Image: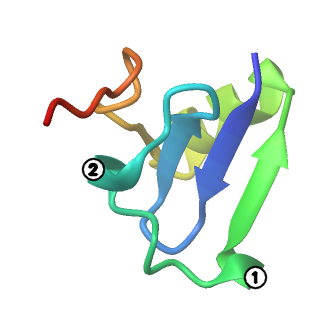
């Protein structure tokens, strides 16, 4: 699984499900990181107090 790490807000997103409501659009590019390492993600959560994004649990759809 691919992850998108927002180092500005200390949030971890699932790349497949990340969208506008996750709120990372104002995070500068230099504060963004992509990774496949679950060990790295778990270290961020455990030791650096990052949180997994609540909005990245399912695909976001737009209904018009």
- Circle 2: is it few (<14), some (14-19), or many (20+) Cα within 10 Å? few
Q: Which of marks 2 and 1 is in front?
A: 2
Please say if 4 is above or below 30.
above
Q: In which quarter of the image is the C terminus?
A: top left
Crowding around mark 1 (Cα neighbors within 10 Å: few <14, some 14 to 19, many 20+) is few
**Residue under the point 61% across and 26% down:** 16
Q: Which residue is drawn at 59% across and 66% down?
A: 7
The answer to whether residue 35 is left or right of residue 44 is right
Q: Based on the displayed image, in which of its 4 quarters is residue 43 positioned?
A: top right
Q: How far apart are marks 2 and 1 (CA)?
A: 20 Å
- Determine the secondary structure under disc 1: helix
Residue 11 location in percent, x, y? 46, 50
Residue at 25% of width from left, 34% of height from top? 62
**Residue 38, above or below 31:** above
Q: Where residue 31 appears, x then y in whole percent?
A: 67, 76
In what element is the residue under mark 2?
A: helix
Residue 3: image x %, image y %? Answer: 69, 34
Query: Which label sits on residue 21?
Result: 2
Quarter of the image holding residue 14?
Answer: top right
Check the image and report above or below for 53 versus 1.
below
Provide residue 8's location: percent of width, then percent of height: 51, 74
| Quadrant of the drawing holding the N terminus | top right
Relative vertical location of residue 7 with respect to residue 61 in this rendering, above or below: below
Residue holding disc 1 = 30
Q: Tell whether 17 sits left or right of 60.
A: right
Residue, far front: 64
Query: Residue at coordinates 30% horizontally, 27% vertically from top-left?
Result: 61
User: Image quarter for residue 6?
Assistant: bottom right
Sequence-earlier tag: 2 or 1: 2
């Amino acid at each position: 699984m691919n992850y998108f790490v927002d180092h500005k807000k200390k949030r971890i997103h699932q790349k497949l499900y990340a969208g506008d409501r996750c709120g990372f659009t104002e995070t500068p590019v230099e504060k963004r990181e992509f990774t496949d390492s679950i060990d790295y993600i778990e270290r961020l959560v455990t030791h650096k107090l990052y949180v997994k994004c609540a909005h990245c649990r399912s695909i976001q759809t737009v209904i018009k």
